Amino acid sequence: MKALQVVAFGKPADAVKLNDVPDVGAPGPDEVVVAVEAAPINATDLMIMAGRYGYLPPLPGTLGIEGVGRVVATGANVKTLKEGDRTLIPILRPTWTERVKFTASWQRPLSPQADIQQLAMVGVNPATAYLLLTDIVKIPNGGWVIQNGANSATGRAVIAVAKSLGIKLVNVVRREDVVPELRALGADVVLVDGPDLQKRAAKETGGAPIHLALDMVGGTSTLNLMNCVAPKGVVVLYSAMSGQPFSGSSLSAIFAEVSVRGFWLVHWQKTAKDETIGKMYDHLTGLVTSGALTAPVVATYGLDRFSDAIAQAASFKGKVIFTPNRA
C-alpha cells in the first residue's frame, strides 16, 4: 500500500516521500476499512511538513487530516455502514494513502448526489466554521457576527453555515478585488479591513450589536475586530495567517469586558460526544448536497504526483485534492 509520508520536517521537497507501508488489514468488530477516494491538501498539512503545527506525527508519518472514501470491509458489530457506502474519515486520521481503518462511531452513509470533492473538505474548515458560530456565543436568529479572512476556505464556509443558521455576517477582507466574489456567494456585508472598520461596520449593520468576532489573521486586524465588538463580546482566534502577533485594546478588555480566546478543532474533538459530532456533520454534508457549501478546487492529483500537487497547493489559489485510488 502506498502512502505520502513526512520523513523530515522542513521544505516539502525534502520532507515528503511516497513510501510503501503495511496494509491496514482486516477490520476489528467495531471497525471499517475505507478506500480513500479524495483527500485535500490543507494549510495545516503544509505547516506539519514544516514542523510548525500544534500536532506533529512521529517520523515517518503519513500525512493528510481529512477525506472521504468507500467502505470496503466492515466489522461484525458495525450496523450503520455497509460495504460500498461512502463516508467521511475522522479528522487527523492520515488520508494521503490508499486505505484507512477506524472505529465506526458517528459516521453514516453520504448522499450519492453530493460532490465527492466537496465532501472531502467537510471535515476541518466547515466543521471549524460551524463550531465558531454555535459553540462559543449564542447568536440569535438575525444576530450579527464579524469575521476577517472572509475569502479563505474557512471564511467561505462561515458564510454558508451562517446563512443556514439565520446569522448575519460582516465579512472583512484585505483586498478590494475579492469583494465582488464574496458578494456573489451571498455575503451580507463585505468590507476591506482598516483602522476605521468599526465606523463602517456600524453603518452597514445599522448599529446592531456584534457579540462575536472570528479572527484568522492576527496582527492589527485583531484590534480592528475587537473595536467592532459590543460590550462583553468575544473575539476568537483560530488561525494567524499574517504570521504577526495579534494586537488588542486594553481599554476594551477592561471597560467593555471584551474577551479574547482561542479555538482549535482538535481540542473540541477530544471531548465531543459521538451524537454531537454526527449532528454537526449531518448539517454540513446536507449543505454540500444542496450545493450551499462549496470551496473552489483547482486540481486533483494521484499520490505519485505529490510534488506538483503540494507546490500548487502552496500558492493558496484554490484547493488541491489527492485521489489515491483513481484508476
Image (cartoon, rainbow, N blue to C red):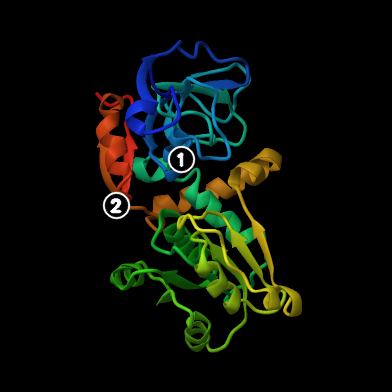
In the image, residue 215 above or below residue 299: below
Residue 228 on image: x %, y %: 57, 78
Q: Earlier in the sequence, mark 2 or mark 1?
A: 1
User: Quick one: 314 or 134, which is closer to the camera?
Assistant: 314
Quadrant housing the C terminus = top left
For badge 2, the amino acid type reads Lys
Mark 2 closeness class: few <14, some 14–19, many ≥20 residues within 10 Å? few
In the image, residue 74 above or below residue 67: above
Residue 235 on image: x %, y %: 62, 66
Q: Is mark 1 on a helix, strand or loop?
A: helix
In the image, residue 39 above or below residue 156: above
For badge 1, the amino acid type reads Met
Q: Determine which residue is flagged by label 1.
A: 47
- Residue drawn at point x = 60 percent, y = 73 percent: 226
- Residue drawn at point x = 38 percent, y = 39 percent: 41
Label 2 – label 1 distance at C-alpha:
17 Å
| Left or right of 188 on screen, residue 249 | right
Residue 90 on image: x %, y %: 54, 34
- Residue drawn at point x = 45 percent, y = 12 percent: 23
Q: Determine which residue is flagged by label 2.
A: 317
Label for residue 195?
Answer: none
Q: Which of marks 2 and 1 is in front?
A: 1
